[in-house]
Amino acid sequence: MEADERTERGERILDAACELLLAWGYRRVTTDEIARRADVGKGTVYLHWKTKDALLLAVVLRAKAADHGRQLARMRADDRNILPSRLLRASLLDFMDDPVLRALYLDDSDILGRLNDIAKKELAELVEAGTQTLRSQLTALRTHGLVREDLSVDQQMYVCMATAGGYFQAEVLFPERAPARPEERADLLCHAIHTALERHGEPDTRALAAAAPGIIARYARLEELSRQEVRRQLRQ
């Protein structure tokens, strides 16, 4: 019961920190206010996290871990979600729905402040793991004939990251140009990636079934790494 109470209390503190980070930004958030919002003592916050930076970084890491968990769940539910067009379609919808992810992906200094630099340093290993996961995903899809081979894997990775990054940025830079429905914006990204990388027509279901287990295993590992990072910020 004590462990359950500690976990619940930690989640309540994270929720309070997240609300304040988004409402006030990194510079104005204090541990005192987080404790008040979470209805705990300031000392209780420090029982879980050594510093304010560690706590706010955990907010960012939790959002990333949840994002990886959603990606993994979608792949497990439908083999077609291992395709980059469908994966990035869902990622854009997640980005639009989660203000922490938006702040992170857009380097929003008003919200994250110097947490931006801390996150880049602390998340470097996780970011590299994500890059290698994408590389292994594209390699597996090429092996099973599910994406074309007229570009190298490195070029395909760049297409994925640059195209998705452009759509993320467009949400801020050109909001008046965007279709009203988020799903339509996501569909356009899906179409762009499908056209650039994947084979025409419906994907081969047997090839999808053959490629899915290995790709899902890599994303499961990525999710676990992101959750390990959340736990690593906790005071031991």
Image (spheres, rainbow, N blue to C red):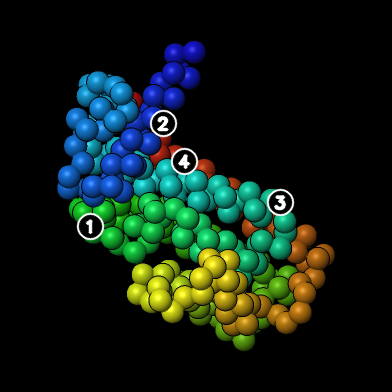
Residue visible at 66% across and 61% down in the picture: 81
Residue visible at 76% across and 72% down in the picture: 203
* In the image, farthest residue toward the bottom: 150
* In the image, farthest residue toward the right: 206
List the residue tagged with mark 2: 11
Mark 3 is surrounded, within 10 Å at the Cα level, by few (under 14), some (14 to 19) or many (20 or more) other residues, namely few
Position of 101 relative to 203 (above/below):
above
Question: Given this view, does label 4 or label 2 mark the residue nearer the observer?
Answer: 2
List the residue tagged with mark 3: 77
Question: Given this view, does label 4 or label 3 mark the residue nearer the observer?
Answer: 3
Residue 118 seen: no
Q: Report if the CB atoms under discs 4 and 2 are less than 8 Å apart.
A: no
What amino acid does circle 2 point to? Glu
Q: Earlier in the sequence, mark 3 or mark 2?
A: 2
Q: CA distance from mark 4 to mark 3?
A: 21 Å
Position of 123 relative to 197 (above/below):
above
Residue visible at 47% across and 46% down in the picture: 65
Q: Report if the CB atoms under discs 1 and 2 are less than 8 Å apart.
A: no
List the residue tagged with mark 4: 227
Mark 2 is surrounded, within 10 Å at the Cα level, by few (under 14), some (14 to 19) or many (20 or more) other residues, namely some
Mark count: 4
Q: Report if the CB atoms under discs 1 and 4 are less than 8 Å apart.
A: no
What amino acid does circle 1 point to? Asp
The x and y percentages for residue 178 are 47, 75
Q: Report if the CB atoms under discs 3 and 1 are less than 8 Å apart.
A: no
Q: CA distance from mark 4 to mark 2?
A: 14 Å
List the residue tagged with mark 1: 110
Mark 4 is surrounded, within 10 Å at the Cα level, by few (under 14), some (14 to 19) or many (20 or more) other residues, namely some
- Give SS at disc 4: helix
Q: Earlier in the sequence, mark 4 or mark 2?
A: 2
Q: Quadrant of residue 211?
A: bottom right
- Give SS at disc 2: helix
